[in-house]
Structure formats: structure tokens, C-alpha cells
Image: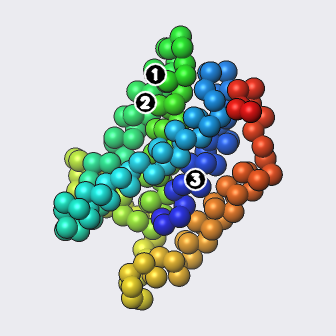
Amino acid sequence: MFIGHLPAGYITAKLLLKKFANTGITTRFFILAAVLGAIAPDFDMFYFYLLDNRQNHHHTYWPHYPALWLTMLAASSVWFKLASKKSYAALALIFSISGFIHMLLDSIVGDIWWFAPLIDQPYALFTVEAVYKPWWLNFILHWSFALEILMFTWAIYLWHFKPSTSRNAPT
């Protein structure tokens, strides 16, 4: 995914905003937590480029382990359920939900090591053939990029035409 993660985080936040309306979180912080969670797994790109010298696929680093995101999702869900003050737990939960959605989206055409660190085996639903140079053209010209454009369009629609209706929306 090139442009799909950020809009996916925004869409996730907008779709779940009403369910978290009574947690005391402003809409802005809720959306920020969702968007940060949606791109957090790709923070490993700093290591990939600056330290690893692109020697290993960045999806093999721990921020791209679905086990990490499932653990965070489970822990934040329990925290949210048990907490009397739910604001921080809700932020952790939306962050974790968006991070896990990142794993699902990357699995469409990107290798994800679903059973890492136990099993060193990548999984992807579809393969992008290396036909064009530079390498990124293969992804942009692949049919799956239409899904990213669709998510981007949906996020813009929600942003422009579906204003927040939650009680705690900032003024």
C-alpha cells in the first residue's frame, strides 16, 4: 500500500466515532490516534533505510508482526472494558484497531509474516509481478491500487460531506 493506510485510519475513526462518543475524547484526538495507528507499522521504514541499508524486507521487522497488533488489540480491549475512565484506553484501542487493519491491507498484495516470529513464511492474497522500472510502478499500475484510490476517495467524502456528529466534537 502506498496511499491507502492513512485514509484507512481516517475511515476507521469516522466509522467508530459514535461508539466511543462517551469516553471523553475529542474527535481530533480520536482521529489522530486512529491515523497514527494506521501508519505506525511503517515507522520501521526509518530502520529499513537508515540502519538496515534495505537488506531485509521491512515487513519482516517486529512492527509488521500481526502478533504484536493482535496482542495490543487484546490488551487495549481488556483495558477499555475494565477501565472506569475510558479515554486513554479508547485511544489505545483505536490505535491498535488501525494498526491491525494495516496488517490486513498489506496482506492484499504485500507479503506479511502472519505467524512471525514463530514461522518465517510470508503470506499475500495476490502477487504484484515485477514488470516495470522503477519498482513502485508495478504497484501503482496494478489493479489493487484502485482499492487505495477508492479508500482515498471514501476518506475525502467522509471529511467533506459527513461532519462529526459526536457530542464531544471540538468546535
**Observer-nearest residue: 110 or 150?**
150
* Residue type pointed to by label 1: Val
In the foreground, 27 or 18: 27
Q: Is residue 167 visible?
A: yes
**Labels 2, 3: front one:** 3
Q: Which residue is mark 2?
A: 74
* Residue at the spot of label 3: 8
Q: Nearer the viewer, mark 1 or mark 3?
A: 3
Q: Above or below — where is 19 with respect to 115?
A: above
Could you give the CA–CA distance between mark 2 and mark 1, rounded to whole angstroms? 6 Å
Residue 121: in sight, yes or no?
A: no
Instruction: Report the number of numbered marks.
Output: 3
| Marked residue nearer the N-terminal end (1 or 3) | 3
Q: Is residue 170 above or below residue 10?
A: above
In three-dimensional space, the C-alpha distance between marks 2 and 3, rounded to whole angstroms, equals 20 Å
| Neighbourhood count class around disc 3 (C-alpha, 10 Å): few under 14, some 14–19, many 20 upward | many
- Say which element carries label 1: helix
User: On screen, 143 above or below 149?
Assistant: below
Q: Residues within 10 Å of mark 1 (few under 14, many from 20)?
A: few
Report the residue at 52% width, 38% height from top: 33
Which residue is more in the foreground, 32 or 57? 32
x, y percent for residue 37: 47, 44
The reply, left or right, for residue 89 in relation to residue 43 is right
Residue wearing tag 1: 78
